[in-house]
Image (tube, helix red, strand yellow):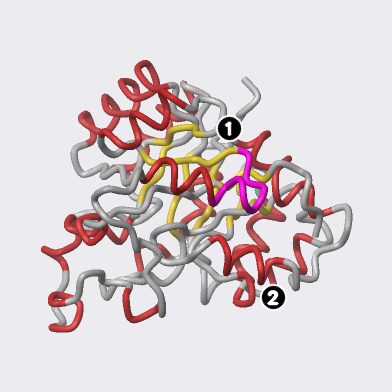
């Protein structure tokens, strides 16, 4: 694994002593006692919490130090509060914004949010969590279609959770087969599947082979758990389709991610594409 490419992390954020609030939007959907009483509905999946800071620590400085330590040049962060606003203002070369967790149940409101965020913050992507919408919205549902068209009009990719949801909510709305219809109806749309696509990762590969605009990023998975089908695809016909994304500080440290990345069996020519070049192209970060 090269260490001098200037990594683009497609999913990063800032630690917080009040990190549990990130998942407040999911509380109305959680029914099991463990999830409802836990600080995080994904705590059962991860052993560590990287949010070990105090109120006196500067979360932007902490994240920048970790990025510098592991050669991360640019991080994509979700628009969410004053810390993110300050990071984007003070370090525009290191952080780029995306509009996080868009819910298309309010169709007009969602499209307006996209256009406003693009005008005010020069966002580089829109992200959405179909299983986290309330009520849930399948990837190929008509409520998403105006959102997809807005992304095309503004030349933005959309990043969509795919596969079994981590929180204990139903996951059928994130079945990877939904992307087949969306890619057919919106051939100009750039889509990035995130959070694994399991147990449909083989289907995800088939669909990426079929549809030029469909991509995959490795968010929320420790590298030793990257699906084999995705690694095999990246090493062959999918070298331009698979993007690196971490999950700091949501549940993984950069130290763990990069220590395990060194053992991922990517071919030499794939590493620069995976760590930087694909993200620069898909998110148009050089513009």
Q: Report the side of 196 relative to 5 (left or right).
A: left
Q: Report the side of 6 relative to 194 (left or right).
A: right
Q: Report the side of 270 relative to 144 (left or right).
A: right
> Residue 189 falls in which quadrant of the image?
top right
Element assignment for label 2: helix
Residue 250 x/y as whole percent: 39, 60
Residue placed under numbered mark 1 in the picture:
188
Residue 208 x/y as whole percent: 66, 55
Residue placed under numbered mark 2 in the picture:
228
* Of residues 46 and 243, the one drawn nearer to the viewer in this rendering: 46
Q: Is residue 14 magenta?
A: no
Write down the region rendered in magenta.
Answer: 66-73
Other-residue count near label 2 (Cα within 10 Å), few / some / many at <14 / 14–19 / ≥20:
few
Q: Is residue 72 magenta?
A: yes
Residue 37 x/y as whole percent: 13, 77
Q: With respect to residue 181, does 94 lie above or below?
A: above
Residue 135 x/y as whole percent: 18, 56
* Of residues 254 and 196, the one drawn nearer to the viewer in this rendering: 254
The residue located at (66%, 35%) in the rendering is 280
The residue located at (27%, 75%) in the rendering is 168
Mark 2 and mark 1: Cα distance apart in space:
29 Å
* Of residues 13 and 122, the one drawn nearer to the viewer in this rendering: 13
């Amino acid at each position: 694994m090269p260490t001098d490419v200037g990594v683009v992390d497609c999913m990063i954020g800032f630690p917080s002593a009040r990190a549990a609030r990130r998942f407040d939007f999911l509380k109305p959907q959680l029914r099991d006692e463990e999830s409802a009483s836990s600080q995080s509905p994904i705590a059962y999946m991860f052993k560590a919490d990287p949010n070990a800071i105090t109120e006196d620590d500067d979360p932007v400085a902490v994240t920048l130090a970790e990025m510098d330590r592991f050669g991360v040049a640019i991080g994509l962060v979700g628009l969410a509060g004053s810390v993110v606003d300050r990071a984007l203002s003070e370090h525009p070369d290191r952080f780029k914004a995306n509009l996080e967790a868009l819910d298309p149940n309010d169709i007009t409101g969602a499209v307006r949010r996209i256009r406003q965020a693009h005008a005010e913050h020069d966002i580089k992507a829109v992200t959405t969590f179909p299983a986290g919408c309330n009520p849930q919205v399948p990837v190929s549902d008509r409520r998403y279609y105006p959102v997809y068209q807005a992304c095309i009009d503004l030349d933005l990719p959309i990043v969509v959770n795919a596969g079994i949801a981590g929180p204990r909510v139903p996951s059928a709305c994130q079945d990877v087969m939904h992307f087949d219809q969306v890619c057919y109806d919106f051939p100009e749309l750039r889509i990035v599947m995130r959070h694994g696509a399991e147990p449909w990762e083989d289907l995800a590969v088939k669909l990426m082979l079929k549809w030029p605009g469909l991509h995959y990023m490795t968010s929320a998975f420790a590298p030793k758990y990257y699906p084999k089908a995705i690694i095999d695809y990246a090493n062959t016909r999918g070298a331009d389709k698979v993007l690196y994304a971490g999950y700091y500080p949501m549940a993984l440290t950069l130290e763990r991610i990069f220590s395990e990345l060194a053992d991922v069996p990517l071919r030499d020519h794939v590493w620069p594409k995976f760590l930087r070049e694909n993200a620069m192209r898909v998110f148009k970060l050089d513009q």
